[in-house]
Image (tube, grey):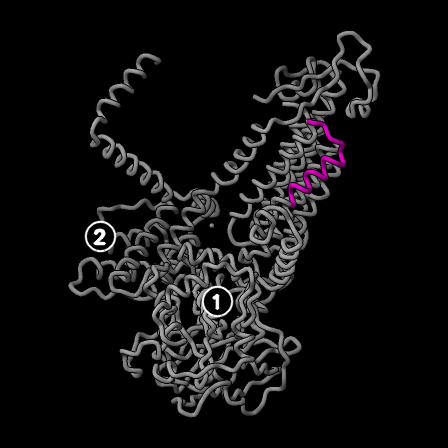
Amino acid sequence: MSGRARLALCAYAATLLAAGALIPLVDGVGWLVQAAVLLGVQSGVGALARRVPLARTLTIGVQTLVTLLLLTLVFVRDHALFGVLPGPEALMRLGELLVAGGEDVGTYAIPAPMTDGIKLMVVGGVVLIGLAVDALAVTFRSAAPAGLPLLALYSVAAGLSDGGASWLWFLLAASGYLLLLLAEGRDRLSQWGRVFGGAARNSGGLADGLAGVGGGSSPVRTGRRIGVLALGIALVAPLALPALDSGLLGGKGPGNGRGSGGGTISAVNPLVSLQNNLNQPDNREVMTYRSNIENPQSLYLRILALDEFNGSEWRSSTRRLTDVPDRLPQPTGLGRDVSVTEVRTNISASRSYQQTYLPLPYPASEVRVGGRWRYEPEGRTLVGDDGQTTRGAQYEVGSLVVEPTAAQLAAAGPPPEELVREYTQVPGSLPGVVAETAEQVTEGASNAYEQAVKLQDWFASDGGFTYDTTVTSGTGSSAIARFLRDREGFCIHFSFSMAAMARTLGIPARVAVGFTPGTMKADGAISVGLRDAHAWPELYFEGVGWTRFEPTPSRGSTPSWTRPEVPTDSASDVAQPSADTSAEPSAAPSAEDSCPPQLRQEGGCGPSQEPGAALPTDRGTPAGTVLLVVLAAVLVLVLPLSPLMWRTRARNRRLGSGGRTPADAAARTLAAWREISDEAWDHGIAPDESLTPRKAAARIVRLGRLDTTAAEAVHRIAGSVEQVLYAPEPRPSAGLAEDALTVRAGLRASAGRGARLRATLLPRSSVRVVWAVMERRTALAERWAGRPGAGRWTARLRRLTRQHG
């Protein structure tokens, strides 16, 4: 491999290693694979341009143009000319995505969901950094300054991460830079020829290969020693310095709630932490309340409404705030014929819950709260002013329980034109499949109410959707189209998709964000936890106003007005928080030439005057090598993390919700048992299939040295498994997912650091993947053996093998 090819390969690797520091900032690692592929294409184009050869500035220009085409193809294909050429519309769309990404970065706490805007910023940033590194280190053959863009990439990640910029990411980034410097030093030595030194201490080593025959203490070896020493100092020095502790843009994120803020959970927009809250290991209480409402399951605590859909995301419109009135005005569109009951609710927010918006039952009619709060009339929300938050707030709310009938909703008149214009807008980027699907689902409906009910039922039960909190969130047009195709997601996907489809049908729609009713406590109060975070669509019907629908399966409660066959006063199960809640070739030195090295590199010396002398040649990197490098980089990045990714995926699927039927509940119980068995296996407690669930639970408690809380959780799950397996009429228990997560926390707390690291990165239970592959291979072999003529082909293959073997 030529010196410049080695430099290009090292520049590619150094950029990817530095990009690893961004992994803690966003949800998922799929973006890194995409960035690796785009970066590989960009590096390959540079190698081909240098092989032509083109002037340096033209090489960089060609790479820049190809990079722009790649970003256009990946992110704004629908707006580009012929799907790849960045016309004015595509460039405008890229600008909109960048603006939306900047707003998302300033809004979301880490790890932020991979919205389209954030993905463009992350992938595009890595590709641009790679272009700068390739230009400096390879095109201009100056590797030292190439450390500046690498340092910028790592510094941005370290400055934004909340403890995620660990020594591991620094070590990877620094190693990539040292590798680049080493490759450049070796290339320069090959240009000058042999490095003379004293007698060689060892022959045949790497240093000898770098220094030439008769090597000694080469400058490259000394440079390596200096680099390793500097890297060691850089790793040790930060131990004596203040640690970085910040959210995505300086605030405390809601990931684990720890930090300098006394365990606060802060977010400006409640949508920020919704997916994080649903996946928290502990369902921490954020508020409690008492209410005189007859049916607590209908008391959703609403924070705000997202009423603007720009194609990149759903957001809350910027509206004028006023002072909080003593009595809030009558809700928009509510008529006199609809049954309305006023209830009183006393809410106490935890000191760990810090939110700018005040959670309220909808529609609130009166709010008594201390502090600096302002009122937004359109969404009927209260917003903190001058730093006011919900931290430790205690307040009383009067609210209306609006109970329309199906007949009243079906007979609703046309909404006001102004409201229709604002709340039925959809962006031009919304794929046509959204409107087409809405038309197909609602076929046969005679009015807007029947259309809304058909949409809700299709999402909740008839459409084959799966509730999964691990699916990458996102609120843009592409996220909705992906959700309709894959049919798996959580409340964000269900609510945003139903609202968008309702708008295409001409029904005014928006999305509300807040909490489901929570869980009743022994003292009569109701507790609301992190995993009660939720989003649901609100559709407008004249004479009733904004009306809640519930398309998300296994979450919250289905509104009575969407179940015309069931009496409105029938009791249902109290809403429970969801538990758904990652041999080196030697250099070939040429003979020394009187021409200066710089001119020789640029090809300005002409033919050699010394007979037999050969100038260094660089024919560039073949296209096949570039492709192999890209594939190797993907394998190097993905394979070590595959056990971790499989284990995380399996855990979330097992603890996710799979439906509302008794059979689904039984399956969830067995899945929770499988999860704690695998978790114990990961921590060194191999499963024993001969034991009963009760004895297996006692064994896990004993060998895992679990505390009382985790031990009780294990036995509760074991008892539920016995109910499912042996009881004549099984009564599956609630809260199994929380118990499974409690057991996991107990196992990790009692294990050492090495055992925790092993259980995370190399879980023993991941061998189930190998077993599954072997079983499938056996099944395929048996199926093949049963086919007519299979024996004849097998015998022929064996004969060929003997002849050539």
Q: Is residue 104 left or right of residue 336?
A: right
Indicate the secondary structure of the residue bearing disc 1. Answer: helix
| Callout 1 crowding tier (Cα within 10 Å): few <14, some 14–19, many ≥20 | many
Q: CA distance from mark 2 to mark 1?
A: 50 Å
Q: Is residue 746 above or below residue 526?
A: above
Q: Which one is closest to the eye, mark 2 or mark 1?
A: 1
Q: Is residue 229 visible?
A: yes
**Quadrant showing the N terminus:** top right
Q: In which quarter of the view is residue 576 placed? A: bottom left
- The part of the image, by quadrant, that contains residue 340 is bottom left
Q: Is residue 340 above or below residue 132?
A: below
Instruction: Judge from the rendering whether residue 131 lies leftward or rightward of residue 405; answer left or right.
Output: right
Magenta stretch in the rendered image: 52-68
Amino acid beneath label 2:
Thr
Residue 625 is covered by the magenta coloring: no
Residue picked out by circle 1: 500
Residue 692's tag is 2
